[in-house]
Image (spheres, rainbow, N blue to C red):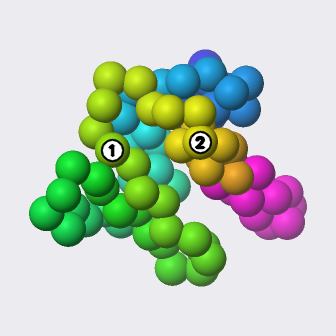
Amino acid sequence: MSKFEKIKLKIKNGQSIPYEEAESFLLKLGFKVRSPGSSHFIFWKEGYEKNLSLKKRSQLLPYQIRMLEEVVKTYEQDEKNKG
């Protein structure tokens, strides 16, 4: 199982992950990142309706994991539609 798949599985199971894993995962999905000068990093992707704001920390908070769960659901739906 690839690192990407392992991270995706953790997210789907609601497990907390470090910021670095979340960043790696989102970048692999084509998200872009910027830091507006605060401790938070904003991730966005054209065609994805929401921006994600993540704070660099050892483990993401539950609400941040829920945001990532939505990204995984969208990703899996897109993959399913591609056929």
Q: CA distance from mark 2 to mark 1?
A: 12 Å
Q: Secondary structure at mark 1?
A: strand
Q: Is residue 74 left or right of residue 42?
A: right
Residue 77 among those drawn in magenta: yes
Where residue 39 sits in the image (x, y, percent)?
A: 21, 50
Q: Is residue 34 above or below residue 67?
A: below
Q: Residue at x 57, y 71 (%)?
A: 50
Give the prevailing secondary structure in the magenta stretch. helix
For image coordinates 42% across by 57% down, the residue present is 53
Q: Quadrant of the N terminus?
A: top right
Please report whichever mark, 2 or 1, sits nearer to the chain's N-terminal start.
Answer: 1
Q: Residue 21 location, x and y as percent?
A: 40, 32
Q: How many neighbours does mark 1 have within 10 angstroms: few (below 14), some (14-19), or many (20 or more)?
A: some
Q: Is residue 39 above or below residue 13?
A: below
Q: Does 2 appear in magenta?
A: no
As drawn, the label of residue 63 is: 2
Closest to the observer, 75 or 19: 19
Inspect the image, locate mark 2, and give the three-letter code of the amino acid beneath it. Answer: Tyr
Pointer 2 and pointer 1: residues touching (CB < 8 Å)? no
Q: Is residue 62 left or right of residue 57?
A: right
Compared with 21, 6 (above or below) is above
Q: In the rendered structure, which amino acid carries the disc numbered 1?
A: Lys
Residue situated in front as seen by the camera: 9 or 82: 9
Q: Is residue 7 left or right of residue 34?
A: right
Can residue 79 be seen?
no
Q: What range of the chain is rendered magenta?
A: 71-83
- Residue identified by numbered label 1: 55
Q: Residue furthest left?
A: 37
Crowd rating for badge 2 (residues with CA inside 10 Å; few <14, some 14–19, many 20+): few
Q: Residue at x 51, y 79 (%)?
A: 46
